[in-house]
């Protein structure tokens, strides 16, 4: 029998086998399983007197959450420092009784620059720790990313208390630049007062969790994105970036892009961007106030977050626009 003969649906035997094998493989992903991970907490803890809330943030969402958490802890009587990790020395974490770390989800994972920095902090033995992530849209491995972040703190000996995920409008500029504007605009009302209420509640629950003795158990969720998170997703995106450079005629040398680039890939003097070092985080294109970063994705010009919200007349809600008990 010919392997390529057409059946009544017009499908060849070969394509049927390929499609069938692919479907079985896809369906088995949850069964084969991504190793599930459990982090235990719940040891006896002395209530924290002071805390450090630290974050990585490129376009302000994670920073906004971090500030709300820090303010809520202060309101609870805990002396709290709120800081971007880039303004801290790794050794600074030793000065605090409780550590809360926040990160955006980038490519289904905690961004590598933040992971690397967290790997250099000193021991957190006996210190309660918590994590939060901000994300855009839906279904982007957010739960596992928050748990990865918690795990990084637990690896240092920290006692995991809790973790949470807070949604925003996505800042992944490639989505709107390739025509999927509505997918992004669906979430343009976020963060709203309800979001800030949830963030405050998370911060309040930290202090309660710190005084409990029961173990806090966290399991990673089975999600195929665990297999493509970070590197593979970044490489895939980079393969489709046709152009990435600085237009020297538009650049005012304000240095925002070089400050924001986590891998020092930009040479402002020549306008060149080292594509090997670049991790496609879009920090340059998202933050340039002059649209001087020329990036093309599948031959479409990528325009950044600042330009997008201005064009769309989007107002990003600030926590102080919402009364604490709204
Ligand atoms: C390069 C890049 C990759 C992203 N990847 C994801 C993702 O995998 N899953 C997700 O839910 N959101 C993703 N997002 C959306 C961000 O997580 C979200 O907008 C976040 O709130 C940004 O935080 P920031 O303003 O503190 O940088 C991505 C955004 C960028 C710029």
Image (tube, rainbow, N blue to C red):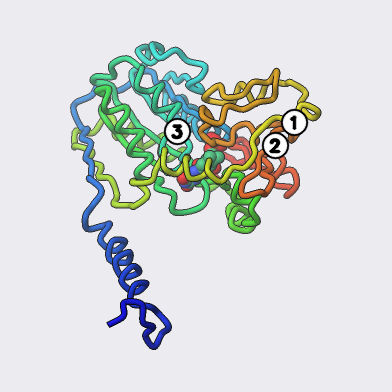
The quarter in which the C terminus is drawn is: top right
Mark with earlier residue (3, 1): 3
Label 2 vs label 1: CA separation? 6 Å
| Residue situated in front as seen by the camera: 22 or 170 | 22
Does the closest atom of ligand 1 sit within 8 Å of the Cβ of label 3? no
| Residue situated in front as seen by the camera: 182 or 2 | 2
Mark with earlier residue (2, 3): 3
Instruction: Please tell me how crowded label 2 is: few (under 14), some (14-19), or many (20+) other residues with Cα within 10 Å.
Output: some
Instruction: Please tell me how crowded label 3 is: few (under 14), some (14-19), or many (20+) other residues with Cα within 10 Å.
Output: many
Q: Position of residue 192 (x, y in %)?
A: 58, 47
* Residue that mark 1 sits on: 247
SS type, badge 1: loop
Does the closest atom of ligand 1 sit within 8 Å of the Cβ of label 1? no
* Residue that mark 3 sits on: 111
Q: Position of residue 12 (x, y in %)?
A: 37, 78
**Residue 231, disc:** none
Label 3 vs label 1: CA separation? 27 Å
What residue is rendered at 23% in x and 33% in y? 212
Q: Position of residue 80 (x, y in %)?
A: 45, 20
Residue 81 visible from this viewpoint: yes
Q: Position of residue 98 (x, y in %)?
A: 34, 22
Tell us which disc is closer to us: 2 or 3.
Answer: 2
Q: Is residue 15 left or right of residue 313?
A: left
Residue 198 visible from this viewpoint: no
Label 2 vs label 3: CA separation? 23 Å
SS type, badge 3: loop
What residue is rendered at 46% in x and 38% in y? 200
What residue is rendered at 42% in x and 23% in y? 77
Q: Is residue 109 left or right of residue 241?
A: left
* Residue that mark 2 sits on: 294
């Amino acid at each position: 029998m010919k392997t390529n003969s057409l059946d009544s649906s017009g499908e060849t035997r070969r394509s049927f086998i390929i499609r069938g094998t692919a479907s079985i493989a896809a369906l088995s992903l949850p069964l084969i399983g991504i190793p599930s991970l459990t982090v235990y907490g719940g040891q006896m803890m002395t209530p924290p007197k002071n805390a450090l809330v630290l974050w990585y943030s490129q376009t302000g969402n994670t920073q906004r959450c971090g500030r709300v958490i820090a303010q809520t802890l202060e309101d609870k009587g805990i002396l709290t420092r709120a800081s971007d990790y880039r303004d801290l020395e790794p050794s600074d974490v030793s000065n605090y009784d409780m550590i809360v770390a926040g990160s955006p989800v980038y490519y289904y994972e905690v961004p590598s620059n933040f992971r690397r920095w967290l790997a250099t902090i000193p021991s957190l033995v006996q210190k309660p720790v918590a994590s939060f992530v901000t994300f855009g849209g839906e279904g982007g491995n957010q739960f596992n990313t928050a748990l990865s972040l918690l795990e990084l703190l637990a690896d240092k000996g920290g006692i995991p208390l809790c973790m949470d995920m807070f949604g925003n409008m996505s800042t992944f500029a490639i989505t709107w630049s390739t025509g999927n504007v509505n997918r992004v605009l669906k979430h343009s009302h976020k963060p709203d007062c309800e979001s800030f209420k949830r963030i405050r509640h998370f911060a309040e629950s930290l202090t309660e969790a710190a005084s409990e003795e029961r173990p806090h158990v966290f399991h990673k969720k089975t999600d195929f994105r665990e297999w493509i998170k970070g590197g593979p997703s970044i490489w895939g995106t980079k393969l489709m970036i046709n152009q990435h450079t600085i237009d020297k005629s538009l650049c005012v040398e304000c240095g925002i892009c070089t400050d924001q680039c986590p891998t020092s890939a930009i040479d402002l003097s020549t306008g060149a961007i080292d594509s090997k070092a670049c991790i496609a985080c879009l920090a340059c294109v998202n933050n340039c106030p002059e649209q001087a970063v020329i990036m093309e994705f599948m031959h479409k010009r990528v325009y950044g977050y600042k330009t997008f919200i201005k064009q769309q007349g989007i107002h990003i809600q600030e926590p102080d626009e919402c009364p604490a008990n709204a």
